[in-house]
């Protein structure tokens, strides 16, 4: 998304807010069609959704410059590389979704693994945060968190530890496993729990980016402070929706 001026940005953001918040699902990302003979171009295969808030809206937890670089440079780069990999590797006629690629990621290149993961993870991550946050877990999710982890405080500690203890770059996840249990763990690099190569597989419910690019300008080496503050901007409305969907 190229932002030419603030009024255009506000228009885009306001237009996008309601629809993205209401309908987020990877089924709304254009299903990838590799019928190139019909005129598809690599840059049209997948796209970034507009952020559902402005770069400055997550202050003071995340500063505007970090958000801008993260969204418009880092995440945009994963998208570009994903579209290149998709154009090169998806030869057969037909349609395939990003989730289907991830579920069979062992059959693709490292470039596809890193960038299909990078695109999915970031699109998911943006939705996990909410400005002026007053959201709370749904009663169903709240009950499941307490049943699984003993208390909300224990959940926060375990989730934080998953992020803090990820050596190098990666993600912390709350997922629903195939047997419908909540589980916390972390993945390296841009891997995620949908991938067939994942150590633990499941449906993402909450994702936290612990790459240095997500926090370094403001927090430098203090990843623990970033994580601790980040817990306060979790969009529990979105997370509760993902939990409900994962139980279907
Ligand atoms: Mn990132």
Image (cartoon, rainbow, N blue to C red):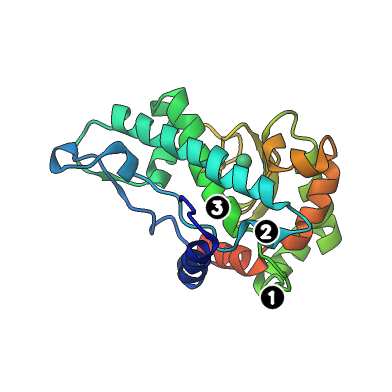
Q: Is mark 2 within 8 Å of ligand 1?
A: no
Residue in front for this viewpoint, 78 or 7:
7
Where residue 219 appears, as percent x and y from the top left, is 82, 42
> 186 left or right of 15?
right
Secondary element at tag 1: helix
> Badge 3 is on which residue?
124
> Badge 1 is on which residue?
139
Where residue 117 appears, as percent x and y from the top left, is 51, 38
CB atoms of marks 3 and 1 within 8 Å? no
Residue beneath the point at 72% across and 72% down: 136
Distance, label 2 to label 3, CA atoms, is: 19 Å
Whichever of callouts 1 and 2 sits on the residue coming sooner in the sequence is 2
User: Which image quarter: residue 193?
Assistant: top right
Q: Is mark 1 within 8 Å of ligand 1?
A: no
| Residue 246 in view, yes or no | yes
> Badge 2 is on which residue?
56
Badge 1 crowding class, 10 Å Cα cut-off, few under 14, some 14 to 19, many 20 or more, is few
């Amino acid at each position: 998304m190229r932002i030419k001026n603030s009024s255009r940005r506000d228009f885009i953001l306001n237009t996008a807010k309601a629809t993205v918040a209401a309908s987020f699902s990877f089924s709304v990302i254009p299903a990838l069609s590799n019928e190139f003979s019909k005129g598809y171009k690599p840059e049209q295969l997948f796209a970034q959704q507009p952020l559902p808030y402005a770069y400055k809206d997550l202050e003071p937890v995340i500063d505007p410059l970090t958000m801008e670089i993260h969204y418009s440079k880092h995440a945009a780069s994963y998208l570009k590389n994903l579209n290149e990999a998709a154009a090169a590797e998806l030869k057969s006629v037909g349609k395939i979704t990003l989730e289907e690629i991830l579920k069979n990621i062992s059959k693709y290149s490292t470039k596809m693994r890193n960038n299909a993961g990078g695109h999915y993870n970031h699109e998911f991550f943006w939705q996990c945060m909410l400005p002026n946050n007053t959201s709370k877990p749904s009663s169903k999710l709240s009950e499941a968190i307490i049943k699984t982890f003993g208390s909300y405080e224990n959940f926060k500690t375990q989730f934080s530890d998953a992020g803090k203890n990820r050596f190098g770059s990666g993600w912390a996840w709350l997922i629903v496993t195939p047997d419908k249990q909540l589980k916390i763990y972390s993945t390296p690099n841009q891997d995620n729990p949908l991938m067939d190569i994942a150590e633990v597989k499941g449906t993402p419910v909450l994702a936290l980016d612990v790459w240095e690019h997500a926090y370094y300008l403001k927090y430098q080496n203090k990843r623990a402070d970033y994580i601790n503050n980040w817990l306060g901007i979790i969009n529990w409305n979105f997370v509760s929706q993902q939990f409900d969907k994962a139980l279907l």
